[in-house]
Amino acid sequence: MHDNTAEQARIANVHPPAWENPRAKDKYHIVVVGGGTGGLVTAAIAAGLGARTALVERHWMGGDCLNVGCVPSKALLRSARAWHEAETAHQRFGGPAIDGQRDFAAAVRRMQKIRADISAVDSAHRYRDLGVDVYFGQASFTGADSITVDGQTLRFRRAVIATGTRPAIPAIPGLADSGYLTNETIFSLTEVPRRLVVIGGGPIGAELAQAFARFGSAVTVLQRGERILDKDDPEAAGIVAAALARDGVRILTGATIRRVERRESIVVHLVCGGRSEELEADAILVASGRVPNVEELGLDAAGVEYDDRQVVTDDRLRTSNRRVFAVGDITGRAPFTHVADAHARMVVQNALFFGRKKVSSLVIPWCTYTQPELAHVGMKWDAANEAGGKIESITIPLHDVDRARLDGDDEGFLRVHFREGSDRIVAATLVASHAGEIIGQLSMAMQQGLGLSAIGATVFPYPTQAEVIRKSADAWRKRKLSPRVRGLFRSYFRIIR
């Protein structure tokens, strides 16, 4: 059941029912459209610096991340992991054998309580106290330097579009009548679907497939491509796929859905491997991509170029209208909360202070929070692979890391790609139980221009899984010890008495 107290607290923060929009000022230094991470960070920094700032949100402050994305999903993923650890503790560690009732409603209540508590940070009242004029309603550009909302016109020196994206719904006959779920609705469930079909094998599909399998659903993932997580290193994705399979997730690749129909249950008609198949389900989760929220924004009136994937921006996040910038998912770049945050910090400088910060200068990590996690930073795996001899690689199995073995989490690896003849890191992929925590160390090294030699000179605490990074540096040093260099050392020690 839903925790009404928690939900009421969240709504009171993210869209207060009795909220009254302020009276518009003569002109704002910056108007931000969209109250997700990118918009909130932009508005907070601008107002903190003294700029007259307005923020327009049509639905919920906090955007997808707080309300229907990162926060609720990671809370449920943690609950699912706890269930799994309890159920496997006897076999893996000699712990007590667990045989009890599953309580999905309790996991949901926990999620809602945490989400409500976190929502205070993104609340409309807090941003008003920071000096931001917060408006609720549909924003629409009426010219190159003006926006209307709730019958008022907001004139601006600069504007930032931060309206994000929403789930892309494939044009499958009968799907609309199936009552499908997306990330925007799945966190409203109060019971676990007995049979769940997930359309899409990207990060959202993989994470929720594993979670609901651990909650007790019979989960099937349908992926059109040859493998799930197809933007990641194939070997890394294969380890995650095997982990999902062990948890009972059935993965069908090369699958084409012909139609969906409702009988006593939902029936998915598909073709896979040249064979027709029918899948019965109690729920369908659509996780097959995103589309930008550009409708009703009046971008044409502002002279802002856009298409069905993005608002078009340059390397400094400026649109075709020099007064208007865009940040976050709406730009079609890496669709992550931490990227929206980075964009926001950059756009305040570029929009208000004639800064020249470039998106291309950012080193962007990402992580899929399955168990094990799959994290990556830098050049995409296929680009590194196609670079041939210009890029070298070192792979360290997690089995070589003592802490991973002690934790029983030694399935995975670190693969570091670096420039030939150099220690400069250009990319890294890590599959490990705490990959998301560890990858940040490599991101910082890359951002600061530190190579493998600097990492090798760093002392890591023992035992930690992060030692895998030091081991990659040690492996790089051993490569430098060529037969010629070994011969020189042998000659040296023959001389030394």
Image (spheres, helix red, strand yellow):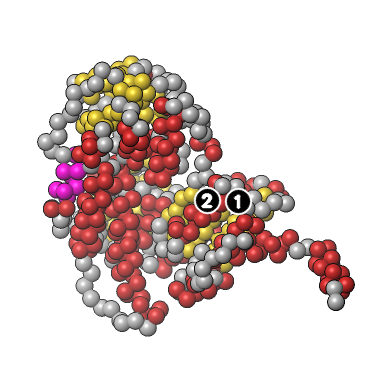
Instruction: Mark yes or no: residue 382 visible.
Output: no
Frontmost residue, 444 versus 264 = 444
The residue at 55%/46% (across/down) is 447
The residue at 41%/32% (across/down) is 348
Frontmost residue, 421 versus 83 = 421
* Position of residue 110 measured from the top left corner of the image (x, y, whole percent): 22, 60
* Position of residue 142 measured from the top left corner of the image (x, y, whole percent): 30, 17
Number of numbered discs on residues: 2
Look at the picture and state if 86 lies above or below 169: below
**Quadrant of the rendered structure where residue 85 is?**
bottom left
Magenta highlight range:
7-15
Dominant secondary-structure state across the stretch colored magenta: helix
Residue 11 magenta? yes
Q: Dot 1 corresponds to which residue?
A: 450
The reply, left or right, for residue 391 in relation to residue 151 is right
The residue at 19%/21% (across/down) is 151
* Position of residue 246 measured from the top left corner of the image (x, y, whole percent): 41, 68
The reply, left or right, for residue 337 in relation to residue 390 is left
Frontmost residue, 178 versus 454 = 454
Q: Residues within 10 Å of mark 2 (few under 14, many from 20)?
A: some
Residue 165 magenta? no
Q: Dot 2 corresponds to which residue?
A: 444
Mark 2 or mark 1: name the one nearer the start of the chain.
2
User: What residue type is disc 1 on?
Assistant: Leu
User: What residue type is disc 2 on?
Assistant: Met
Report the disc number at residue 35: none
Helix, strand or loop at disc 2? helix
**Cα distance in 3D space between marks 2 and 1:** 8 Å
* Position of residue 113 measured from the top left corner of the image (x, y, whole percent): 21, 56
Instruction: Mark yes or no: residue 353 visible.
Output: yes
Q: Quadrant of the N terminus?
A: bottom left
- Residue furthest front as drawn: 497
